[in-house]
Image: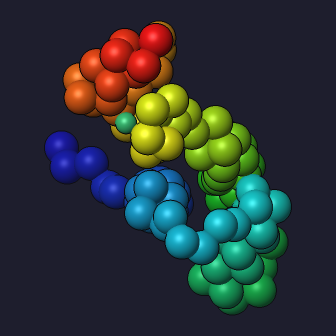
Amino acid sequence: MAVKPDPVFTKLTKVLSALKETTVKEKSGEEAASELKEDFRRENGGAPLTDSQRQAVRRTKVRVEWESTRKKHVRRCVACGTQLPVTARADAKTCSDACRQKLARNR
Ligand SMILES: [Zn+2]
């Protein structure tokens, strides 16, 4: 039995994956949610949003807010000020071994 793709879910996935790519244009959760709401309303031909569409809008808002909070908590290398990768260990203070050694020498 083939699974019929849920158009709402497809759209939500698209919106959420686009989030990761938008680094230049910052959007608030409220903005992103209302954009998606308008989008759904157009698709519905002006009819009210379905439950799953409303849920998608809510999830988008929460997700966008979470993403922007995360972006604000960017950590920087204490030696050169370079942004630490998100994969950096929680206790990492420098971006590279070179910076770590530089810091150790200055001590
Ligand atoms: Zn560094």
User: Which quadrant: the N terminus?
Assistant: top left
Instruction: Name which residue lies at 59% across and 45% down.
Output: 71
On the image, the x and y values in percent for residue 16 come to 49, 55
Instruction: Name which residue lies at 23% across and 23% down.
Output: 97
Judge by depth and name the residue closer to the eye, 105 or 90: 105
On the image, the x and y values in percent for residue 10 come to 41, 60
- Left/right placement of residue 35 relative to residue 90 reads right
Vertical position of residue 14 compared to residue 104: above or below: below
On the image, the x and y values in percent for residue 17 come to 42, 57
On the image, the x and y values in percent for residue 106 come to 42, 19
Indicate the quadrant of ligand 1 in the picture. Answer: top left
- Residue 51 seen by the camera: no
Tag count: 0
- Residue 102 seen by the camera: yes
Instruction: Name which residue lies at 51% across and 36% down.
Output: 76
Quarter assignment of residue 88: top left
Vertical position of residue 60 compared to residue 66: above or below: below
Quarter assignment of residue 44: bottom right
- Left/right placement of residue 52 relative to residue 95 reads right
Judge by depth and name the residue closer to the eye, 2 or 97: 97
Instruction: Name which residue lies at 50% across and 64% down.
Output: 23
Quarter assignment of residue 96: top left
